[in-house]
Image (cartoon, coloured by chain):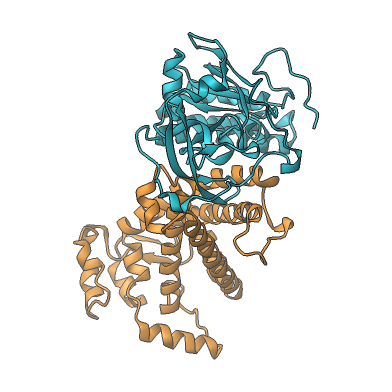
Amino acid sequence: MTDANVRSKGRRRHRLHPLAIRIMHWTNAVAMIVLIASGWAIYNDEVIFGWLHFPNWMTLGAGPEGALQWHFLAMWVLAANGLAYLAYGLATGRYRRMLLPVRIAEVLAEIRAALALRLSHDDLTRYNAVQRLLYISIILVGIVQVLSGLVIWKPVQLSELAVLFYDFQTARLVHFLGMAAIVGFLVIHVGLALLVPTTLLAMLTGGPVVARDPPADVDRNPPADAETPSPAPTQPEELAS
Amino acid sequence: MSLPPRSPSLFRPARAIDQSVLAENRALLRAIDRRKILRGGLSLGALTMLTGCDVTRRDSVQSVLKAVSAWNDRAQALMFRPNHLAPTFSPDKVVKPPRFNAYYDVEDMVPVDGETWKLELAGLIADKRPWTLRQIYELPEQEIIVRHICVEGWDYIGQWSGVSLRQFLERIGADLTARYVAFRCADDYYGSIDMPSALHPQTLLATKYAREPLADPFGFPLRLRTAVKLGFKNPKWITAMEVTNTYRGGYWEDRGFNWFSGI
């Protein structure tokens, strides 16, 4: 999708990050930070790795009971917000438009460019292959976190789901590794946002105005179409017309 | 270890914890029906803000957290499947001996004398005659091999036997429509569970571990063992049981841990 393309459509226009996305992004950010910091305090009460304790100043909640209260508050916020985000992304075609396709060759090329310090962010409206891969991955990690969290909370009531994680301690381990992946993502995500402040600003103000693509009347295309991993080069044009 | 003097009522906590906010919010939450839970949660939050002028910010955060914890009690009660069984295991997976756990160290544990021990009954029960250990041992026995999960995060598989709590409640003519079953223990620990969990087929008044009489550190002569609650919801060294519609809390619950704590 080029700029000329966008202009020529002249249909429904919206910001790069519509208000709904911005609200959900920052709600998620707060819930996630509360969950991570309280989760560290809960972890400290019975560590998985003997060498790893999180310093108290990094944790949230007075004692394990306080940390659990925070965790059991923020989990509802994260889960409800996450479901709304998934529904929004699928219904509006935002995922299809912004996160697909992911091509391995492009990912490798982007990584090479990044290592050579040739990061370009001229066009905020288009995520590069590495961004797409990272955003898709972190959404999937978020889903795994909710599922493993549910299993740790309710290993008996949700015993059918629990078997997917082998047993209680492996579910704890998965939940821990998911946390580690999210923290790793956060470091990169926040680091890059600070390096290219226009991206940070866009998540506050909405960013540049773009045309909705594809328009609402073809949103109801069969999903099979939308999820084709490597659509023919002409397909985005067809969807948009 | 010297135990503090008992309060006049068997079921009144020896040390009063500041539960005023919890009690208020709990009543408010119980009064609203299912559909209004979300709305109720919002107004609770708003309420806390309104009273922000006369309480410190820290207190209002605490009251929100406690209100959410009470809300989580209700959410878990809705999720509870009364006839869904916890996974069970083969005897070779059983950890012997089980893990000691109390609010004090094992060396401070005071054994209970089985000869003089009695189980006292109170509340909505038709036959409140106390039970001796011999009478308890004569009851039909049920065995469960289930995973014990501690709120801290550790777990082990244990083999417990004793009378089914449901059968015992039926035998003593307890009101099975009451809300809670509460316990008091020889070490001044106390706790309460919801009636549906008390009636679950894997909830026992256990007298044996791995087919041997319970050892002193693990609750001799009588302890609760339910497969549908976290470890701390299983009182040991039980001396009294009450069936009631009044919320009794529990030792750890009154210190901030979630009351329902179902698994």
Q: Quadrant of residue B217?
A: top right
- The image shows residue A80 at horizontal and vertical percentages of 44, 47
Quadrant of the rendering where the N terminus of chain A is positioned? bottom left
Q: Is residue B135 visible in the rendered structure shown here?
A: yes
Q: Is residue A118 above or below residue A236?
A: below
Residue in the foreground of this view, choosing between A29 and B221: B221
Quadrant where the C terminus of chain A sits is: bottom left
Determine the residue positioned at 29% across, 62% down.
A11
- Name the foreground residue: B102 vs B130: B130
Q: Residue at left 60%, top 22%?
A: B248
Tell which chain the image draws in cyan.
B
Which residue in the rendered view is the most extreme toward the right?
B2
- On the image, the x and y values in percent for residue B194 come to 49, 27
Between B209 and B255, the one nearer to me in the picture:
B209
Up/down of A97 relative to B58, above or below: below
From the top left corner, tell me how far across and down residue A234 is, in percent: 22, 79
- When the figure is inspected, residue A177 is found, relative to residue B80, above or below; the finding is below
Total numbered badges shown on the rendered structure: 0
Q: Is residue B79 above or below residue A74?
A: above
Furthest toward the top, the residue is B126
Q: Quadrant of residue B139?
A: top left
Chain A: its colour in the image is orange
Question: Does residue A19 appear in this view?
Answer: no
Residues B117 and B14: in front is B117
**Residue B58 placement (x, y as % from top left):** 72, 38
The residue at 40%/29% (across/down) is: B35
